[in-house]
Amino acid sequence: MPPVDTFAGAFGNIAWFVGDVAFTWVPATVGTVTGTAPGSSPPISLISQPVTLTDAAAFLQGASQSEFDALYRSWAELVAISIVLSLLFGALVIYCAVRIMEVRRHERMRFEAAVHPVAAHDIPRTQLRWNGILEEANSDDERKWRLAILEADIMLNELLDVQGYRGETMADKMKQAERSTFRSIDAAWEAHRTRNQIAHEGSAHLLSAREVRRVMAMYEEVFREFKFIE
């Protein structure tokens, strides 16, 4: 048997072994059973070429009654060998098909993870992020209030991306939303407008603790609708 250097070489060796079984071992076994192996009378040579229908007919015509009877009796062994080989190759085909399906599934999962920056399995991490935003919103520092609203709006933008809305701005993305699939769209618009006022007006836009709680409640309503947070 030739040495195995590559993956393709391994398959070559497997094919060589199967060919040796089919065209050397099996004919030798049949010859031994039927008494027509080399050394018997009359001897036959081992099969080295594919057997044609004409060859089979010529063999049957030239065989004696005892040889024909022995071949008939050994037919069950030949069928059993064929079934075993078929099962082995069938199992190999099924294994390869399953492996290909697993590879395709892993590729699809990696593709989806690359398309969606925040996937379903990232919800615990998103929840921790939201808890941090709430801590800033519940503080006594107005500067942290502004940061909380800005960070919550970033989360809203990520949610829109995950839901498949596309656009240059968040307004472009939210214009694509329909109330049948985005029940809290009004809250999203109102919270985003407050964020824009903070971003554009800066400290000129006065905030109160009550206003911050109202805005954060609107963001939370959106996030809970899409199970972005628990």
Image (cartoon, rainbow, N blue to C red):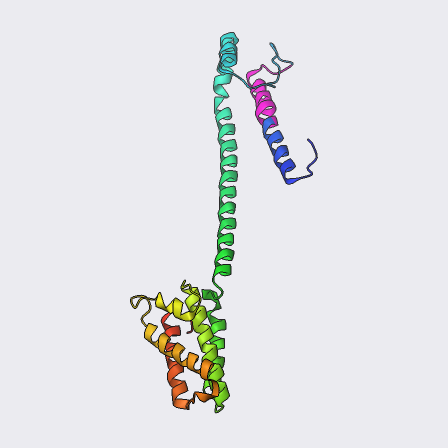
- In this rendering, the answer to whether 214 lies above or below 162 is below
- In this rendering, the answer to whether 140 lies above or below 192 is below
Q: Nearer the viewer, residue 26 or 171?
A: 171
Magenta region includes residue 26? yes
Corner quadrant of residue 137:
bottom left
Question: Residue 213: percent from the left, percent from the top?
Answer: 40, 85
Quarter of the image with the C terminus in it: bottom left
Magenta region includes residue 63? no
Point 43% across, 87% down: residue: 205
Q: Is residue 79 at all visible to an observer of this figure?
A: yes
- In this rendering, the answer to whether 217 lies above or below 115 is below
Name the side, left or right, on which 2 lies relative to 93.
Answer: right
- In this rendering, the answer to whether 141 lies above or below 179 is below
Point 61% across, 16% down: residue: 37
Q: Is residue 227 at all visible to an observer of this figure?
A: no
- Region of the chain picked out in magenta, as a range: 20-38
The secondary structure that dominates the magenta segment is helix
Question: Residue 24: percent from the left, percent from the top?
Answer: 61, 23
Point 48% across, 68% down: residue: 122
Quarter of the image with the N terminus in it: top right
Q: Residue furthest left?
A: 180
Question: Residue 44: percent from the left, percent from the top?
Answer: 60, 13
Point 29% across, 66% down: residue: 180
Question: Residue 157: percent from the left, percent from the top?
Answer: 44, 70
The mark tally for this picture is 0
Corner quadrant of residue 191:
bottom left
Name the side, left or right, on which 135 lies relative to 11.
Answer: left
